[in-house]
Image: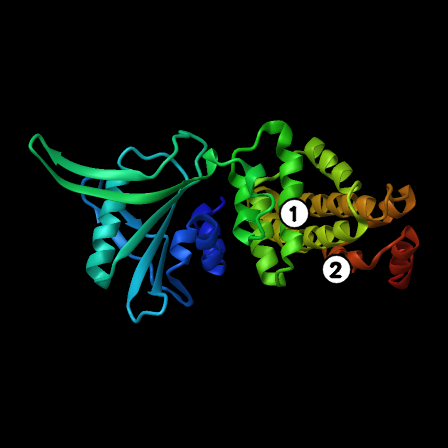
Amino acid sequence: MTDHDHLFKELLSEFFPEFIDLFFPQVSAYLDRTSVSFEPQELFADLTEGETYETDLIAKVKFLEQSSYFIVHVEHQGRFEQNFDRRMFNYFAQLHRVYGLPVYPIVIFSHRSPRTPGDRTYAVNFPDWEVLRFNYRAIRLNHLNWQEFVDQPNPVASAFMAKMKIRRQERPQAKLACLRSLARLRLNPVQNQIVSGFIDVYLRLQPEENQILQEQLDKIDPGERGEIMQIVTSWMEQGLQQGLQQGLEQGLQQGLQQGLEQGREREVALILRILSSQLGGTVSTELASVISTLSFEQLDELGIALPGFTSEADLRTWLQSRRLC
């Protein structure tokens, strides 16, 4: 199962200043970007619900041109909870007590519904007196239109577009926009993998949608298409490793050989799809048949070599050099 909190934490830990720039530019104006450090997660026991919760991301940051610090607490919430406002207040109270610093609380809501906008409040009131009013900032991804973030040169925007409000018929177009936005950023390989992995998890297309994506890819500038295909190839290399791991896990449950074969077949199909797009046409039946017989290790080598192929002749030469055809 996907650890959604981990995916959000990994992304925001790598691109924390960019996250603040994107959604809270007023905070960026007084935040010292060079001072960011991440604190251990805090455990909190909710006695009323009998549950133990763990905070997602706690950043200790410095006020710009000052010696004092404050805490930015970012929580990811992937499902609707009736009493979540109270839990956020309890987090706030605990963090304020532990660190003795001002706390800026932020929640990223990624569930599909409800779609109500605005920040959130937890209040304690009596008929004659308001004892408490606690406010926190809320980012509701399901309320944001992905098209409004296409031109943002920000890796968090490239990733979060995949979780924003996307109509079904827009899914291939939205995924291409995420990939083009990511390619323009020219991040290092590790950062590319973090963002592209996030996109792939939250905007995974059906086969017919992938076909539309490939048709749209064929229409863009070859140079830009090549950069995008390098990102996709990176997914494939990771997929080869994950496919093997998934195959092993399936094998423990349903038979090792069956799981490995299914994982290998998925990687063969992915390689053929990438080759068809990169070479501008379908791969010949002869070479497709050869690729379908390759082992996991050979598929891994082929995936690494893919960006250097400009014609089917390059593919044939590569296969022949390894006596595979």
Q: Which corner quadrant of the image does residue 116 belong to?
A: top left
Q: Residue lying at the far bottom in this picture: please name it.
A: 67
Q: Which corner quadrant of the image does residue 241 belong to?
A: bottom right
Query: Mark 1 packing: few (<14 Cα in 10 Å), some, or many (20+)?
Result: many
Vertical relation: 325 (above or below) 171 = below
Which circle's residue, 1 or 2, is located before the other in the chain?
A: 1
Q: Is residue 103 left or right of residue 206?
A: left
The residue tagged with tag 1: helix, strand or loop?
helix
The residue tagged with tag 2: helix, strand or loop?
helix
| Quadrant of image for the C terminus | bottom right
Disc 1 marks which amino acid?
Leu
Q: Residue lying at the far left in this picture: please name it.
A: 128
Q: Is residue 48 visible?
A: yes
Depth check, front residue: 302 or 96: 96
Q: Horizontal and vertical percent for residue 107?
A: 37, 45
| Residue name at image x 55 percent, y 53 percent | 154
Say how many tags the image has.
Answer: 2
Q: Is residue 205 visible?
A: no
Disc 2 marks which amino acid?
Ile
| Residue name at image x 27 percent, y 43 percent | 135
Give residue 131's mark: none
Give the residue at mark 2: 304
Q: Which corner quadrant of the image does residue 200 belong to?
A: top right
Give the residue at mark 1: 179
Q: Give the label, 1 or 2, closer to the camera.
A: 1
Q: Horizontal and vertical percent for residue 279?
A: 85, 48
CA distance for labels 1 and 2: 19 Å
Q: Horizontal and vertical percent for residue 245?
A: 60, 53
Depth check, front residue: 54 or 150: 150
Vertical relation: 195 (above or below) 66 = above
How is the structure coloured here?
rainbow
| Residue name at image x 20 percent, y 41 percent | 133
